[in-house]
């Protein structure tokens, strides 16, 4: 099968990511236009409750799967663990809804949003297999289809019923259609020998319990890092709301949203390059691994520098255009936020390299350090400086993570270039698209 270039994979991933972001924004606009303020609050609460739970349930299995260059686990192991995690995650969300929801109505919204995110999480296993084969075009088409369906069905359900329950159910229905129709078909087309659902039911799980446990023990660390990563940017916001009020928090959040655009570029490039990083590290090809990671990191740093320069040169104009003159008066804060974002982009690129090298527990330590630095910085600066202090605290947290990530990356590099690593004989490996497995060869 013809090899896919990193550039084409990046374009596909970026395009799909932008479409998905616009569709999610469109869903929020539909709720704001077609539902009451209280119902919008119910939907926002559902997102706030389900996102951390289902994010941890994913355990970043897709990243682990896409960089599993040695084929340590099969597709059935990733799918089986994800299904178990999703069932547990949805159950946890329903329990939280029972305890915290003000009404049965709000509880149903939380449960249906959790179900929708559960379908999305299972799709990630299909994406991981396709990403490993560098078929990001198929992933992009699935993401675009999911975005288009949700952008049509959710507003339609709200318009017909004026009920957020119907809107959440429409979102779950749209994402289920994409999973069971598009994703399953794409996987069978790419790997003719794989039957995802029959594989799930026919696998002798009692005999495979050891592999499933090993996979869980390997990836629970990634789930914890995802949870910490989601917590870090919100700590300054919690303190800002407590000390400065919701108006200042709203302004800060609006300005910080621009950082997500550059993050989407870096994330898309990471999806394109991560399978190759995993293969290079597994094969002990230190030079190729180093070149790929250095190029990815340099590109991420370039995105960050563009963000800083763009905010300084065009920030006032952009803020006035999108938000209004009141927001444009906070140009200094905007530049500080883009500076923190630039550090974030470099950290994201190093994190991809560390995951490809299976340096997982070290990432938990550096995330704990980073979150602690952000919390301490926010507690010190936010009451004194306000929103700018929140940006300072976030930037300081990224500096701490960058320092730790650089040290871990250097340690990975030392292991790859050690004399015993260079002298060790490794079989050459190539991906068999038809069987979805790695084949070994001792020949040149």
Image (cartoon, helix red, strand yellow):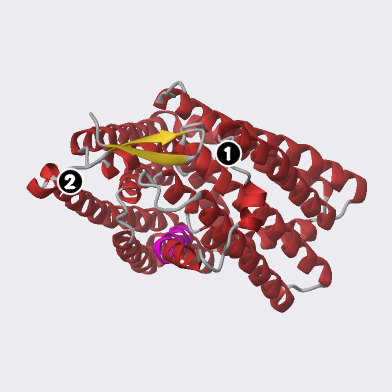
Q: Residue at x 66, y 43 (%)?
A: 24
Q: Residue at x 84, y 53 (%)?
A: 166
Please tell me whether mark 2 sits on a helix, a strand or a loop. helix
**Toward the viewer: 285 or 119?**
285
In the rendered image, the residue lying farthest to the left is: 419
Is residue 330 in view? yes
Magenta region, main secondary structure: helix
Alpha-carbon span between mark 1 and mark 2: 35 Å
Q: Give residue 250's mark.
A: none
Determine whether 231 is above or below 185 in the image: below
Sort mark 1 into few (<14), some (14-19) or many (20+) by Cα contacts within 10 Å.
few
**Toward the viewer: 114 or 239?**
114
Q: Horizontal and vertical percent for residue 184? A: 66, 41
Q: In this image, 18 relative to 201: left or right?
A: left
Q: Horizontal and vertical percent for residue 300? A: 34, 36
Start-end of magenta stretch: 217-231
Q: Horizontal and vertical percent for residue 164? A: 81, 55
Which of marks 2 and 1 precedes in the sequence?
1
Q: Residue at x 12, y 42 (%)?
A: 422
Q: Is residue 30 a member of the stretch shown in magenta? A: no
**Toward the viewer: 228 or 5?**
5
Q: Is residue 229 a member of the stretch shown in magenta? A: yes
Is residue 336 in view? no
Q: Horizontal and vertical percent for residue 407? A: 19, 53
- Which residue does the numbered mark 2 point to in the structure image? 416
In the rendered image, the residue lying farthest to the top is: 2
Q: In this image, 302 relative to 165: left or right?
A: left
Determine whether 122 is above or below 18 in the image: below
Q: Give residue 193's mark.
A: 1
Q: In this image, 257 relative to 158: left or right?
A: left
In the rendered image, the residue lying farthest to the right is: 160
Q: Quadrant of the C terminus?
A: top left
């Amino acid at each position: 099968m013809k090899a896919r270039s990193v550039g084409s994979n990046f374009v596909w991933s970026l395009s799909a990511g932008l479409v998905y972001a616009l569709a999610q924004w469109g869903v929020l606009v539909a709720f704001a236009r077609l539902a009451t303020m209280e119902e919008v609050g119910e939907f926002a609460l559902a997102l706030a409750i389900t996102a951390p739970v289902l994010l941890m349930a994913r355990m970043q299995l897709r990243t682990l799967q896409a960089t599993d260059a040695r084929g340590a686990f099969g597709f059935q192991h990733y799918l089986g663990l994800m299904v178990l995690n999703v069932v547990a995650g949805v159950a946890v969300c329903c329990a939280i809804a029972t305890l915290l929801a003000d009404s049965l109505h709000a509880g149903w919204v939380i449960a249906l949003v959790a179900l929708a995110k559960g379908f999305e999480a299972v799709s990630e296993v299909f994406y991981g297999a396709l990403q490993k084969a560098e078929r990001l075009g198929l992933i992009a088409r699935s993401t675009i289809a999911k975005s288009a369906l949700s952008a049509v069905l959710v507003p339609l359900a709200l318009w017909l019923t004026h009920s957020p329950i119907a809107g959440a159910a429409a979102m779950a229905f749209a994402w289920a259609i994409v999973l069971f129709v598009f994703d399953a078909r794409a996987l069978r087309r790419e790997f003719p020998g794989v039957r995802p659902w029959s594989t799930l039911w026919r696998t002798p799980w009692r005999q495979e319990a050891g592999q499933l446990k090993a996979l869980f023990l390997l990836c629970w660390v990634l789930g914890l890092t995802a949870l910490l990563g989601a917590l870090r940017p919100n700590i300054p916001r919690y303190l800002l709301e407590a000390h400065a009020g919701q108006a200042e928090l709203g302004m800060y959040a609006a300005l910080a949203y621009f950082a997500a655009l550059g993050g989407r570029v870096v994330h898309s490039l990471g999806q394109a390059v991560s399978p190759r990083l995993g293969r290079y590290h597994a094969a002990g090809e230190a030079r190729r691994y180093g070149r790929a990671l250095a190029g990815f990191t340099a590109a991420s740093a370039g995105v960050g520098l563009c963000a800083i320069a763009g905010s300084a040169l065009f920030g006032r104009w952009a803020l006035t255009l999108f938000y209004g003159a009141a927001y444009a008066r906070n140009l200094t804060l905007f530049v500080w936020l883009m500076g923190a974002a630039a550090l974030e982009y470099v950290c994201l690129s190093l994190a991809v390299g560390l995951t490809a090298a299976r340096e997982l527990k070290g990432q938990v330590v550096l995330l704990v350090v980073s979150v602690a630095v952000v919390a301490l910085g926010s507690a010190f600066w936010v009451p004194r400086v306000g929103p700018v202090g929140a940006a300072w605290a976030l930037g300081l947290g990224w500096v701490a993570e960058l320092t730790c990530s650089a040290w871990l990356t250097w340690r990975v590099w030392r292991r790859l270039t050690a004399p015993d690593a260079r002298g060790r004989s490794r079989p050459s490996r190539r991906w068999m698209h038809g069987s979805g497995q790695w084949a070994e060869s001792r020949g040149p």
